[in-house]
C-alpha cells in the first residue's frame, strides 16, 4: 500500500479539479467520491445515519465514474445528504461495445443530512477525463462544474 495520498486538489482556471488515485478501479471510485465530498463538507462532522444504494450502467469507465459522482451530487441536492463512506459491491468494466457490453456499478454510500455546504458543485464533467494506469495505480483528473 502506497503512503501517497489517494487524492489532491489541483489548479484549474474556472472550475474545481482533483487528481485521484486508486490501486483498483473500485478504490478509484471510492477515493473520487471521498475527495469530492471532502471539498464540499466537513467529513469529520458528517453523521453516518443514512445509506443509499447506487446502481448504474455505462459504456466506458469514464462515463461510469461521472455518472457515479453525479448521482451522489443529485442525492446531495435533492435529499440534502452528503456521504463519507462508500462500498463498491460490483464494478464490471464495459466490454466489447459491438457485443452490447456495458459496464455495471453497484455501490453503497453512507452519510447523513447536511445543512450547509462549503462550496456547491453542480456536476462532475468529462473535461479532459481519462482513467489511466500510472506506477501501478489507476489515476484520473476530474473537473467539477461549480
Image (tube, rainbow, N blue to C red):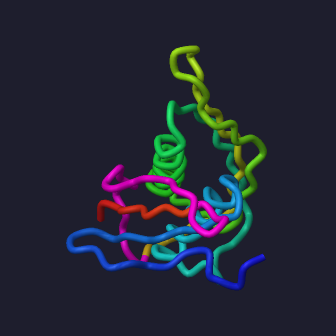
Specify whether residue 104 is painted magenta: no
Whether residue 125 sits left or right of residue 87 in the image: it is left
Q: Is residue 124 above or below residue 64?
A: below
The magenta stretch spans residue 133: yes
Who's the residue at 68% across and 48% down the image?
Answer: 52
Quarter the C terminus occupies:
bottom left
Locate residue 126 relative to residue 130 in the image: left or right: left
Figure label count: 0
Q: Is residue 82 visible?
A: no
Q: Residue at x 37, y 70 (%)?
A: 17
Q: In the visual, does 141 lie left or right of 54?
A: left
Residue 58: x %, y % from top left: 53, 33
Farthest front residue in view: 135
Report the quarter where the N terminus lies: bottom right
Query: From the viewer's perspective, is residue 144 above or below residue 2?
Result: above
Image location (x, y in percent) of residue 13: 21, 74
Q: Is residue 17 above or below residue 105?
A: below
Residue in front for this viewpoint, 144 or 26 = 26
Q: Position of residue 110 (x, y in %)?
A: 71, 60
**Residue that extends furthest to the top in the rendered view of this protein:** 99
Image point (50%, 57%), residue name: 76
Q: Main secondary structure of the magenta part?
A: loop
Q: Nearer the viewer, residue 108 or 1?
A: 1
Viewer can see residue 36: yes
Residue 131 in picture, x, y percent from top left: 50, 54
Tell me which corner region of the image, top left, top right, bottom left or bottom right, holds residue 111.
bottom right
The quadrant where residue 45 appears: bottom right
Residue 81 sits above or below residue 88 on the image: below
Q: What residue lies at 75% left-to-right and 41% top-to-bottom?
A: 90
Residue interval drawn in magenta = 118-138
Amino acid at each position: 500500500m502506497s503512503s501517497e495520498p489517494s487524492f489532491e486538489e489541483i489548479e484549474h482556471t474556472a472550475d474545481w479539479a482533483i487528481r485521484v488515485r486508486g490501486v483498483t478501479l473500485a478504490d478509484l471510485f471510492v477515493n473520487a467520491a471521498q475527495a469530492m465530498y471532502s471539498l464540499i463538507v466537513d467529513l469529520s462532522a458528517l453523521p453516518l445515519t443514512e445509506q443509499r444504494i447506487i446502481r448504474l450502467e455505462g459504456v466506458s469507465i469514464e462515463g461510469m465514474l461521472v455518472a457515479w459522482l453525479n448521482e451522489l451530487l443529485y442525492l446531495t441536492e435533492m435529499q440534502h445528504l452528503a456521504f463519507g463512506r462508500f462500498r463498491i459491491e460490483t464494478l464490471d468494466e464495459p466490454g466489447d461495445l459491438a457485443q452490447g457490453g456495458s459496464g455495471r456499478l453497484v455501490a453503497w454510500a453512507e452519510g447523513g443530512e447536511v445543512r450547509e455546504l462549503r462550496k456547491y458543485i453542480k456536476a462532475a464533467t468529462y473535461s479532459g477525463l481519462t482513467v489511466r494506469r500510472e506506477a501501478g495505480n489507476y489515476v484520473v483528473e476530474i473537473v467539477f462544474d461549480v
